[in-house]
Image (cartoon, rainbow, N blue to C red):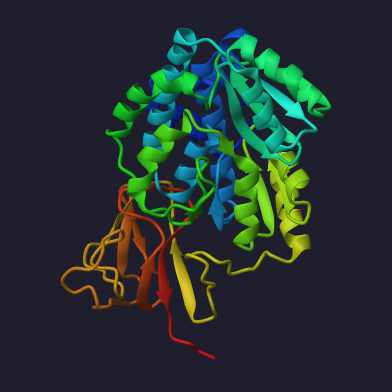
Amino acid sequence: MGEPWIDHPSWEFVGEASEAAERDLSYLLLEAPIEELTRTENAQLATTVLSLVVLDAVERLGLTPAACAGHSLGEYTALVASGALTFEDGIQLVVARGNAMARAGEESPGTMAALLGISDDDAEAACQRAEGDVWVANYNAPGQVVIAGTAEAVTLAGNLAKELGAKRVMAIPVSGAFHTPLMQGARVPLREALTHVTFRTPEVRVVANVDARVHDDPSDWPGLLSAQLCSPVRWRQTLETFAGLGLTSLIELGPGGVLSGLAKRSLPEIQSLAVAKPADLDTLMDQIAEAGTWRAEPALHQGEHLYMSERVVVSPSGGIFSPEESLRAPGTGLLPGTDGGPGADAISIVAVGDLVGRVGVTEVRTPFAGQVIGWLAAAGERVQDGQPLVWMRVPDRT
């Protein structure tokens, strides 16, 4: 699954993920036999790492999202994409989650099945009538619901679903009844792992699986990720939330194209595309150009566009960003990510060539003179070559 990306610059993320996970992820993505790759703990880690590789490749094009969401495991990638989690913390949480869910699946065996051509209400009724340990696990799209539970109860609920009008019942080859109470055993170890990471305020809106709502308070996310293990994924409702936010394009990042297919079924008016291999990047840029949404100076900061009097200072290389401590921006405090404090209303005026920060040991100096009005990367964030770092207002020469 990783082979198409090995010659792309974003493949470097695999090495960094291997260090964070203490696993040889290159082997997992390139050589592991299917029996090994599809084990819960391996499948989750491999999918996340490759999704983050694709995310980095898209960011290198200069594109940033207006909102993010992920289906089940993908919620962790969405949180990294939004800036709410660091890359390393995201990888370590996925390792903990995969291991915890694998153990829970062994302790409380279960399975899953997709019901096609049935309403949400009828799928719920089939589970209730089965009178066993079976529940709705995913609300994926109109007419597509996934149920999960013990093998016997899932089979019975599937038969009842057919009586209620389901056109097809498809078994899903998984090792547990994910997103049901049978995953309760995974919550304690995941909660423990969640105490060791720091959640930041997302830079863009993130819609949660549990309630299909936007959550911008970082303190919400540990509870949401814990609850997600035993709660249904409300993906259809998430797409409806996206539509309500006014979004017009949905880009799926990572292996496969299931989510973009669900989006086309749920919201045909929204343009959808899966980016799973490097060739899809060209298709993405073509689609954006055709839609007329690409601009030479794109929206980069919470929905605000850059005008002729505004510029960004970009990173000269990849590495950890350290902002210049003397810089201030109106109402933001001394450093990126701070909230007010002494001098919060002060401003910084910089001249051409002034130091605005460092990426690793490389100095970042502004090619523009003007006023610092915001930061586009947080202190300690890992940034890529060409990624915007500082938002500035320059004298209007028109």
Counting from the top left corner in percent of width and height, residue 82 is at: 47, 50
Which quadrant of the figure has residue 2? top right
Counting from the top left corner in percent of width and height, residue 83 is at: 42, 49
Counting from the top left corner in percent of width and height, residue 175 is at: 57, 13
Give above or below for 284 relative to 339. Answer: above
Would residue 363 appear left or right of 224 to someone viewing this image? left
Residue found at the far bottom of this picture: 398
Residue at image position (60%, 21%) is 148
Residue at image position (44%, 55%) is 316
Counting from the top left corner in percent of width and height, residue 37 is at: 58, 15
Which quadrant of the figure has residue 245? bottom right
Does residue 224 appear in the picture of this structure?
A: yes
Which quadrant of the figure has residue 369? bottom left
Q: In which quarter of the image is the C terminus?
A: bottom right
Would residue 195 appear left or right of 116 to someone viewing this image? left
Q: How many numbered tags mark residues here? A: 0
Would residue 329 appear left or right of 228 to someone viewing this image? left
Would residue 262 appear left or right of 370 to someone viewing this image? right
